[in-house]
Amino acid sequence: MLGLKLATDPRWVNIVESNIEEILTDHAWCEQKAATNCITIIINNSEKPQLVTDLLAIAKEEIEHFEMVHALILKRGLTFGRERKDSYVNELVQFMKKGATREVALVDRLLFSAMIEARSCERFKVLSENIEDPELAKFYRDLMISEAGHYTTFIGFARKYGEGIDVDKRWKEWLEYESKVIANYGKQETIHG
């Protein structure tokens, strides 16, 4: 379904388990950034009522996820750390088309968003199937399902607003690019690290 070219090595979970506080802090900030991304798309495309409605719903859900992860951090007596830089996402930003028309820019932003949701979904699946902690396994299984829905929404809007743009071709380019980027990750206790 997701079309990702490079799967996460399940041994990444061993790294995650060595520092649960770090993965949860990083994850919380990822959820906040996902909500902010939705708001940015809304701000730049406010004339599209269905896009605004659906991305508002995703933004709310992402903030709820942020709240859920934060509550889990507190419940476990861990410390919610400062915001983390997400090098993976920053590398993906570099692939977005610069100086394009509004339509091309929107489609690329939607595909960028779909890519992050797809990789997060895949990482949550790996966590849910491999982490020793039963509470976290269920937590990540539930979030995996949500991320898959977000991915589908972003891809759907890219196709809806991509008139005159070969969205499927561009999505394949995103998948190829992302496979090269993600090959350098999987060595840290962060969602994309």
Image: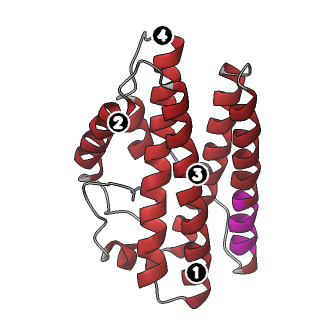
Q: Which mark is residue 136?
A: 1
Q: Dot 4 corresponds to which residue?
A: 101
Q: Is residue 110 magenta?
A: no
Q: Nearer the viewer, residue 84 or 94?
A: 94
Q: Main secondary structure of the magenta part?
A: helix
User: Which comes before the other along the chain, label 4 or label 2?
Assistant: 4
Screen quadrant of the N terminus: bottom left
Q: Which mark is residue 150?
A: 3
Q: Are marks 3 and 4 in contact (CB under 8 Å)?
A: no
Q: Are marks 1 and 4 in contact (CB under 8 Å)?
A: no
Q: Give the magenta range.
A: 65-74
Q: Quadrant of residue 66?
A: bottom right
Residue 62 vertical placement versus 175 (above, below): below
Residue 5 vertical placement versus 161 (above, below): below
Q: CA distance from mark 1 to mark 3?
A: 21 Å
Q: Are marks 2 and 1 in contact (CB under 8 Å)?
A: no
Q: Quadrant of residue 78?
A: bottom right
Select label 4 or label 2 by which is in front: 2
In the rendered view, does 136 fall on the left or right side of 42? left
For badge 3, the amino acid type reads His
Q: Nearer the viewer, residue 41 or 53?
A: 53
User: Which comes before the other along the chain, label 1 or label 3?
Assistant: 1
Residue 160 vertical placement versus 25 (above, below): above
Select label 2 or label 1 by which is in front: 2
Residue located 58% across and 46% down the image:
153
Q: Are marks 3 and 2 in contact (CB under 8 Å)?
A: no
Q: CA distance from mark 1 to mark 4?
A: 43 Å
User: Circle 3: is it few (<14), some (14-19), or many (20+) Cα within 10 Å?
Assistant: many
Residue located 68% across and 66% down the image:
69
